[in-house]
Amino acid sequence: MTTEGNEVLPEWDMSPFFPSLASDEFKNEMNSVVRGIHDVVAEFDLLQIGSTEGRDQTDISASETFDRLVASLNAMLDRMRIVGAYISSFVSTDSRNGDAQSAMSAYQSATIPVSTLMTRFSAWLGSIDPESLISTSKQAAAHAFMVHKAVEEAKHLMSPAEEELASELSLSGSRARSRLHGDVSSQIVVSVPGMGDIPMSAARNLAYDPDRNVRTSAYKAELDAWERNKIATAAAFNGIKGDVATLCRRRKWASPLEESLFENHIDSTVLGAMMSAAHRSFPDFRRYLNAKAKLLDLDQLAWYDLFAPIASETRTWLWKDAEDFVVETFGTYSDRLKSYAKRSFDERWIDAGSRPGKADGAFCMRVRGDESRILTNFKPSFNGVSTLAHELGHGYHNLNLAERTYLQRDTPMTLAETASIFCETIIRTAGLAQAESTEKLSILEASLQGSCQIVVDISSRFLFEQEVFKQRSARALRSEELCEAMLTSQAETYGDAICSDLRHAYMWAVKPHYYSTSSFYNYPYMFGQLFGLGLFSIYEKDPEGFKKDYDSLLSSTGLADASTLANRFGIDISSEALWESSLDILRRDIGLFEKIVQSAVK
């Protein structure tokens, strides 16, 4: 347990999986996973998977080969998931844990062949007729979307030797740089006047402090800390983006964005429709930010005011309050959702408190079957409750995916936010319905604060990454250039709602998403937010009809592209009208927020 103030916050319980990292049970399973990987590699070699020539050199039919391989891969990947998540649970909660870091390094080294296996599998599928395979194999029919995706991916593969080399080099390249950023950022100590040296996550949490002097001091101290660590973070950033750009070029993708769209199961038409609608909403979000400035008695917001609590927020949400409210409110949707949330709390699936070495932000990771683990840095505000509900939504999505095989569960980021946004909206709607006028304002603020981040800030990150890839193809960028590009993108999106001298130049260092080997780890969040809002609107019109299909939709997010799944609910995601209708929900909230603010400041 972690103590914050007068409250004890839960830490997640990993004992159902293994007693400890040092236990014989964990070591034996780790060794078993490694042997399992080697066995699958041997099976691929025996069946000569990975070259078009090999297909004619065996007496086993393509359907029999597929059935054998998909069974082996699913079993191997499920076991890897448990071990990898177990190790991550220690690294993410204490990056200074030397045993956990060593275990992670060993795990990453041992699992390097898996990337090559998946590449070989895609190459093999690209060499045969997918329709013939699907018609002769029940397993292939059950994995039809994966088969078609692999066939397309095969068109963008380098030679087997090059793919194997790229996979091996990633351990000392992009993956090492990702770990470097995680280790450095989680261990940065920020010197805040009056508070001494505190972890970066704690310093960033001060952005929610009601005292503007505290927020200002924390903001300045945070920027100073990033400035001191800019060499390591810029090196990690440039290395990862350089690797991505090089591999995209060698794999004949037109750009990292084209590859990202493919991985996220949408196309440029869908992205263009959504981004166009988002850009048209910027003036509306600036109205919200200007209204917040007025409520805070400011002429203009600074970056450190974006998350400032408003004066009317009188309620402090203790952890137990948040737990009870989430369970009760989820129950208004369904008993199944309520039971899932209650189980998550009762079985200690959540790590809630901030502490040195713990990763900032929040996330949910699947461990095995229907079990997940949720990390958050809980704040005693409605925003903290909303974040908790969001991550529980991810866990509920995992619950619905549990019936699928590992390869069927491959959900793109665009659809991974579907349940989290839906659950977050359930909580917001209930909060607004129960709140008095002053509390209603604070709930609207928490909701719009999050929506502004998803639509406006995500747009700035998207623009920033587009610009970075344009320049990174020629050379590495200095930290000063990264800061300049970030400030430019913030100016284009936030406009004059944020003081030009008080933006955040180091957001490229803050966000761990930039240090993933997946590019454009940003716009899918906007897709998820707006798609989730669209689904919630349908739910409100026909609750019982919606419930019949919703869990099935969640269980199918790895079985079809986004357009196909959206069509189940009569949604055309290539139409700007869809995105405008979702943004209209937010515009209504902005209008209500402005109206309440005008009454409050008279």
Image: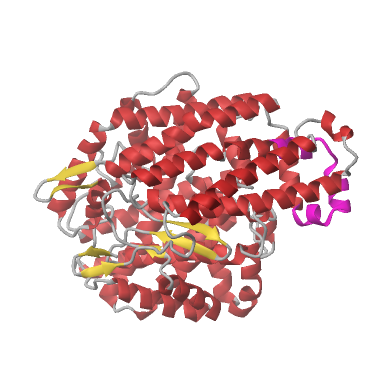
Does 407 sit left or right of 349 as displayed? right
Q: Where is residue 563 in the image (x, y as percent from the top left)?
A: 67, 54
User: Can I make out residue 180 in this image?
Assistant: yes
Residue at point 30%, 36% (across, down): 505
Q: Which of 505 and 249 is in front in this view?
A: 249
Residue 90 lies, with reference to residue 42, above or below; the image says below
Q: Is residue 133 magenta?
A: yes
Identify the image quadrant of the C terminus. Answer: bottom left
**Residue 235, above or below 309:** above
Asked if the stretch drawn in magenta spans residue 411, the answer is no
The single residue placed furthest to the left in the displayed view is 194
Q: Magenta part of the protein: which range?
A: 120-143
Residue 287, image x and y in percent? 33, 55
Residue 457 at x, y percent in the picture:
39, 47
Q: Tell me the residue at 45%/76% (across/down).
A: 342
The outermost residue toward the front is 24
Quadrant for the N terminus, please: bottom left
**Which residue is more in the foreground, 443 or 118?**
118
